[in-house]
């Protein structure tokens, strides 16, 4: 019979769902549902838990469950409230299980293997999440009859009898539902504007209203606004600690502050430092003063060139990073725990990367620089490595390196500011409603309107709210919402309004 109905209903909606609560009980399960009419649907649920497969285990809850059901929907199938009835059959093998609320205490001390059949009723609610997805919690109760064999323990005990009884049990679930083939997309439809509602000539019956709705960007606060022109800012989700294999110079979003050779004093008049420092301070100050976004981490990596004593350069790199941190704290009240300030030591990774670029781009010196690369790759002792580089080709290659490469390594390195912001729940609601408005589903449009009423004072919601109101027959208020959005510069609302009043 199930197959026959499926053939007849091939043009109707089919659903596949999974009960998440059943999953928590480590039982794989699946439900297939069929739409029978505007108000009725039927389905078949199956679940199977084969483990533990080791029969020597004393604790077990192995079972097979099959449950056909029928549902009545108060609005339409797969939308909003539903009431249902189901038949439950299960074959089970259970022992040493403690169920919640003190239920079925007898299986704590003995094993029972048998079958049950029950008749249940339930109530649930299904939220459409767009064209393809729903989520539906439900709760109910079932009354049934079970017959079973009793054993002394989970795997080794002798059979101590056979029994049967009537019982009552709860049933509940949270289904995640996939609709096949999905609710149809909304198609342009002919509209007639009721003249009393607007002060413009009404549309004709042949006018097609195909409204424009777009997702709105999430409001990321002042930090998000500044990030557009200041890529040194980044969301905290992009933060990762520094390790010395990173090539910081290739991060075009970072800012760099430079130092004279072998010095860690921060000078504003050195290599345009003051412009960079003022920019970092201004960005930090604006985000710190905002109440919708906040500074979460300021990452500073101090570097030193490869020249000289490695121990000295290690200390120098740390001091350079700390010099920048102290400068920022003198200008803006930033607590120590917001800084990730580290010394990167001698910038060998940066140096090698630059050499590689020069080999590719400077044919005149490529051969000598390739020799320098070979020394870096094959000599692990940094002191010996630097000595070999200095002596390479009688010192000619080292002079070229110091004149063209090493000056950029004398800096405070990588500077990034990471931020977080107050979650923009309104944007999430508006965009969820927009997805519902793209479906050719009256109940989806009513659900979209319900969502948008929650954010009706948000200017970003006015265009979508106008579309939802129009689809739900509230034309006068829809026109008012379109006008409000258009007055605030929403181009989509202007076009929607033009389509309605032309």
Image: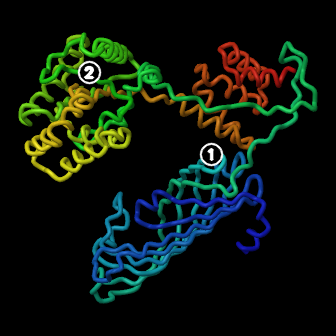
Q: Is residue 265 left or right of residue 59?
A: left
Point out the image quarter for the N terminus: bottom right
Structure colour scheme: rainbow
Extreme residue in the right direction: 205
Q: Residues within 10 Å of mark 2 (few under 14, many from 20)?
A: many
Q: Is residue 99 above or below residue 288?
A: below
Which of the 4 image quarters holds residue 88? bottom right
Q: Residue at x 49, y 25 (%)?
A: 219
Which of the 4 image quarters holds residue 306? top left
Q: Residues within 10 Å of mark 1 (few under 14, many from 20)?
A: many
Mark yes or no: residue 340 visible. no
Which of the 4 image quarters holds residue 5? bottom right
Residue marked by disc 1: 128
Q: Please, what secondary structure does the residue beneath circle 1 have?
A: strand
How far apart marks 2 and 1 lie (CA) works out to 53 Å
Q: Is residue 452 left or right of residue 140?
A: right
Q: Is residue 183 above or below residue 211?
A: below
Residue 454 coordinates in the image, percent (x, y): 58, 27
* Viewer-side residue, 31 vs 131: 131
Q: Is residue 492 left or right of residue 415?
A: right
Q: Is residue 495 left or right of residue 485?
A: right
Residue marked by disc 2: 257
Q: Is residue 397 above or below residue 276?
A: below
* Viewer-side residue, 342 vs 207: 342
Mark yes or no: residue 28 visible. yes
Q: Give the mark toward the camera: 2 or 1.
A: 2
């Amino acid at each position: 019979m199930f197959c026959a109905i499926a053939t007849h209903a091939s043009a109707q909606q089919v659903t596949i769902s999974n009960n998440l609560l059943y999953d928590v009980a480590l039982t794989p399960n699946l439900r297939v549902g069929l739409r029978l009419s505007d108000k009725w649907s039927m389905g078949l649920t199956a679940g199977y838990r084969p483990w533990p497969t080791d029969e020597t285990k004393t604790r077990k809850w192995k079972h097979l469950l099959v449950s056909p059901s029928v549902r009545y929907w108060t609005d339409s199938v797969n939308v909003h409230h539903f009431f249902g009835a189901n038949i439950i059959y299960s074959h089970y093998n259970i022992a040493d299980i403690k169920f919640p609320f003190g239920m079925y205490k007898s299986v704590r001390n003995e094993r029972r293997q048998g079958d049950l059949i029950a008749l249940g009723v339930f109530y649930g609610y299904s939220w459409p999440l767009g064209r393809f997805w729903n989520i539906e919690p439900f709760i109910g109760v079932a009354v049934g009859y079970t017959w079973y064999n009793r054993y002394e323990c989970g795997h080794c005990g002798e059979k101590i009898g056979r029994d049967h009884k009537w019982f009552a049990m709860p049933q509940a679930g949270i289904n995640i539902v996939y609709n096949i083939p999905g609710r149809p997309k909304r198609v342009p439809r002919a509209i007639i504007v009721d003249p009393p509602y607007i002060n413009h000539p009404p549309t004709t019956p042949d006018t097609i209203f195909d409204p424009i709705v777009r997702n709105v960007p999430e409001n990321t606060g002042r930090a998000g606004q500044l990030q557009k022109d200041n890529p040194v800012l980044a969301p905290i989700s992009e933060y990762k600690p520094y390790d010395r294999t990173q090539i910081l110079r290739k991060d075009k979003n970072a800012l760099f502050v430079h130092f004279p050779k072998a010095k860690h004093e921060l000078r504003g008049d050195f290599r345009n430092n003051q412009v960079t420092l003022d920019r970092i301070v201004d960005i930090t100050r604006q985000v710190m003063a905002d109440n919708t976004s906040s500074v979460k981490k300021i990452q500073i990596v101090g570097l030193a060139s490869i020249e000289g004593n490695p121990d000295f350069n290690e200390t120098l790199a740390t001091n350079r990073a700390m010099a920048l941190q102290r400068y920022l704290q003198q200008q803006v009240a930033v607590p120590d725990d917001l800084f990730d300030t580290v010394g990167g030591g001698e910038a060998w990774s940066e140096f090698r990367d630059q050499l590689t670029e020069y080999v590719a781009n400077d044919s005149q010196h490529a051969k000598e620089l390739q020799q320098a690369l070979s020394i870096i790759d094959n000599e692990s002792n940094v002191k010996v490595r630097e000595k070999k580089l200095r002596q390479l080709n009688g010192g000619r290659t080292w002079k070229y390196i110091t004149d063209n490469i090493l000056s950029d390594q004398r800096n405070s390195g990588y500077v990034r500011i990471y931020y977080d912001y107050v979650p923009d729940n309104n944007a999430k609601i508006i965009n969820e409603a927009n997805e519902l408005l793209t479906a050719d589903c009256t109940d989806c449009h009513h659900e979209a309107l319900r969502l948008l009423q929650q954010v009706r004072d948000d200017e970003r919601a006015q265009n979508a709210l106008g579309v939802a109101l129009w689809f739900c027959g509230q034309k006068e208020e829809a026109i008012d919402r379109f006008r409000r959005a258009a007055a605030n510069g929403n181009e989509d609302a202007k076009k929607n309004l033009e389509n309605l009043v032309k």
